[in-house]
Amino acid sequence: MLLFLRIISAFLCVNALQDVALNSDNGVEWVVHNVNKSILIPAKVPGGIYSDLVDAQILKDDVYYKSGDEDYRWVAYESWTYERNFTVPVDWTVENKETLIFHGLDTVAEVILNGVQLSPAVDNMFLRHSLNVKGILKYDGLPNHLVVQFGSPVKTALERSHSWPRVVPDCVPASYHGECHANLIRKTQSSFAWDWGPAFPSSGIWKDVELLTYNVAILRDVTVQTEKTDQYVNNRRIWLAKFVLHLEAVAPHAAVEGVGRVVLFIADAPGGMITGEMKVGPTNANEDGELDVEITLRVSEEIISLWWPNGMGQQTLYQAVASFNTSSSSGFAEESTLKKVNIGFRTVELDESQVGKNGLTFLLKINGYAMFSKGSNWIPPHALPEMTSAVNGREMTKDLLSSAKEVGINMLRVWGGGNYESDYFYDLADKMGILIWHDMMFACSMYPTVASFLDSVKVEVKQQVRRLQHHPSIVIWAGNNENEVALRQNWYGTGANFSSYVKDYALLYNLINTTLLNEAPDAIFLFSSPSNGIAMRDVTGPIADDPQSRYYGDIHYYNYLADGWNPGTYHLCRFASEYGFQSLPSMETLRTAGPAADDWGVNKAFFQRRQHHTGGYQEMIIAIQRHLEMPSNTESEEGMSRYVYLTQVNQAMSLKTETEVYRRGMSIIKDDGDGQFLGATMGALYWQLNDIWQAPSWATLEYGGKWKMAHYYVANFFSNLMVSPWVTDYDELQVYLLSTRPNVEEHVVLDCQLSIKIYQWSDPCLLKKQTITSKLISGVGEPFKTVDPGLKDHYPFSAQVNVSSDGVALFVWLEAQGVRGRFSDNGFLLVAGDEDEICRRSNSVEEQATMCVELQGHPRCSVLHNSVRRFTGQRAGNHSVPANMKSFTRTLTFYFRDKPEDSTLLRQSITVTHLLS
Ligand code: BMA
């Protein structure tokens, strides 16, 4: 049975315009088969081949189960054909433009309707393809037969490597267990494997399909620039909202006549809205059949509130409805299309001002205020693109972004080896105040410059920017991930042909730059990350002498060999857009990947296959051994469980240490002795927020959304106001009070009480306590109001949990097995509370190891790296609790994601792991 759904979201049909969705309805119309049809199964559209094969039980398990990435690899070597029949509704009339629109085809495909191959060619999963079906489409109840034949992405890339000029690297490192030549195909680059992810080179119709016919023109996209002017009316500043309505006419140079309109809903405006209108034509579309209609609205600052990043204020959004109505004088019935976008009023600047002899700052100013960018890097939350779509990926996306917001993240970098995400993702980022640094989807590779490739990239950038530009959250665009530094440092053996690679590099990223600025003239565009920023590009050209310079732009910093707990390991820079440490996800999450009893062990095939970063397990072991006692045997479930915990402790401590160096760097400008100044650090985006599957990685959120210990630490090291104690190389204790509220003229003076408490490892007693009362000068109180993080929405239920210990307990880790949610704190140091007396004194300095610094009642205890001796995991000696001391207790809250059947069951599901000195 054929069923048609009217699309109501994007298009509103008035008259002539005709539009039906060709998505599947319960998976019955579409089928998919391999070449010899030995497999012929129902298919889902939007969807993908791996999901279809799992649904049909051809693949027996979830793709991530056991060695699915290896066992199911054959799927990527097959060619898959999707087919369906359909008829157009009986009342349809023949129109000027008849087009089949695929909003996403993954990746290289031939589309055939009624035996006729449609054009243009399809070979980029990031494109919307609009295929002409005029003269091919059958009306009057006659059946249409639609076929989409995908070539194997792996074979296509391989074939291109033979026919295109060589572009390195050929393959990902062997430890990734991946496929070769991902750079020759416009597809999620990590789908051929990455150092944190499996290869699932997918095929499929991963976004909506629709059949659309019309006679004159439709509104396709809306971009908008909000500009703060220097004009005033009644002493109130005027903002401009410059809308561009991007129309698609029926053909190149076709005449278009009609009216464009914008209605901007603002409650305080007269009548609750501001409107604008622009009469068009008759005007001819350009050679691509496109026509832009510009409508500028003037908005007084009196009636709007600004949009602020998370932690700096509210995220006020206003809905704009843009529409285009063709005029009946064009000889056809009126056609009307509309689009709704949410917009925000905010300004964004990248400040690159001189620091010292040669350096420049690299800081974002939002609404005129310099902000410290606190955040992380976003990778695809699932290897199958259909799982991340606005339909299937909603829950996962919302959960991950909420977890980012809750810990004070105000920026995420959408990393260049992944995807341009769903509209839903950016809508949420807008609502949550999470700024987006958006890479274009190029990573860790050189790229071809053959004409067809460049043409496709140009369309990709144009379409994606038009789709995404209106989001106030998107503040920076970058051309790629690490390609500039790779070229400069000869990662892939480009040295012998350096100048030719530089030429190709400049060609590709200049093209991207121009295309982006055409669509978004006010966009901030960096060629790469890391880079020396924009101003230096004019000096050095596209490839900086040192893209990792600490005096310019952003850096990526990894050092797995040094002591990650030692602040001295890290260097000040202007902005760290990547840095991180591996850990393993919880045993609970690992178990969902199905290891058998004898699979547990870092040297076992199961865990070796999941570790793509060469030497990763060993690096973690060495890092752990510096401060903690490694279990003697990691080749058992018990040993792994201990190892997992310790890797999480190490990751949490190392990330905290490094991030605090950067946060302290915000107020440091230090002469490096050469007239250059280090410091003025204004950003820390750690690698990486989320996981793609259950495996060792740098993520702080596990696949499935569970918080690793490090994620709890993020909440502390990204808090707006924090205490950051550290011990210098000269054994001096320095305590920084850090505020990410920017300094502006009207300071707010906070009375601040700082308590320093010293404990010794071997005894539960407080050794020393010193309290300092001081005044902390912070930024403005308004508009940086504390905003409710909206926990209620995300966690509708909560329960209290008490934890107690009779000794100083370190890295106390609570897990609620089988219950989705999180604790109010975790991985903490459990020490005596204020009421406990100083019950023993010691003059031994080595014993002064644990320190709590308290700022206005927010206890923050730190383990100081250079006073730490090996924690054995066993209590050393036999310390009885002094009679006048209560056991140490802490009350925590558990926030449930789902309604608990019985919250008393929570207690039974909790396990506690910790170290005692
Ligand atoms: C960075 C990233 C990724 C990678 C990560 C960890 O350089 O850009 O390519 O996954 O390091 O190695």
Image (cartoon, rainbow, N blue to C red):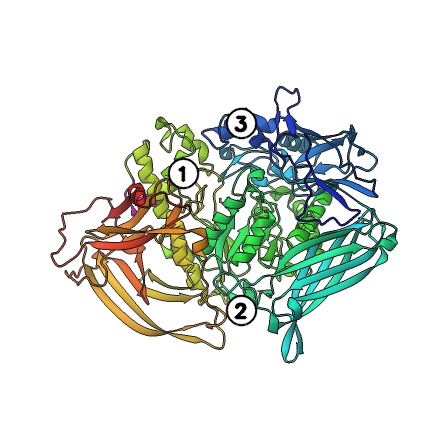
Of residues 376 and 567, the one nearer the viewer is 376
Residue drawn at (58%, 38%), measured in percent from left and top?
386
Alpha-carbon distance for marks 1 and 2? 41 Å
Nearer mark to the viewer, of 1 and 3? 1
Of residues 307 and 176, the one nearer the viewer is 307
Q: Is residue 450 visible?
A: no
Quadrant of the rendered image containing residue 325 = bottom right
Eyeballing the image, is 72 above or below 211? above
Disc sitting over residue 72 in the figure: 3
Q: Earlier in the sequence, mark 2 or mark 3?
A: 3
Side (left or right) of 839 relative to 440: left
Disc 2 on helix, strand or loop? strand
Which amino acid type corresponds to the residue marked 2 in the rendered image? Tyr
Task: State which region is magenta.
Answer: 624-630
Which residue is label 1 attached to? 589
Side (left or right) of 517 relative to 91: left
Quadrant of the rendered image containing residue 39 = top right
Q: Earlier in the sequence, mark 1 or mark 3?
A: 3
Label 1: few (<14), some or many (≥20) within 10 Å? many
Q: Residue furthest left?
A: 883
Which residue is label 2 attached to? 369
Which amino acid type corresponds to the residue marked 1 in the rendered image? Thr
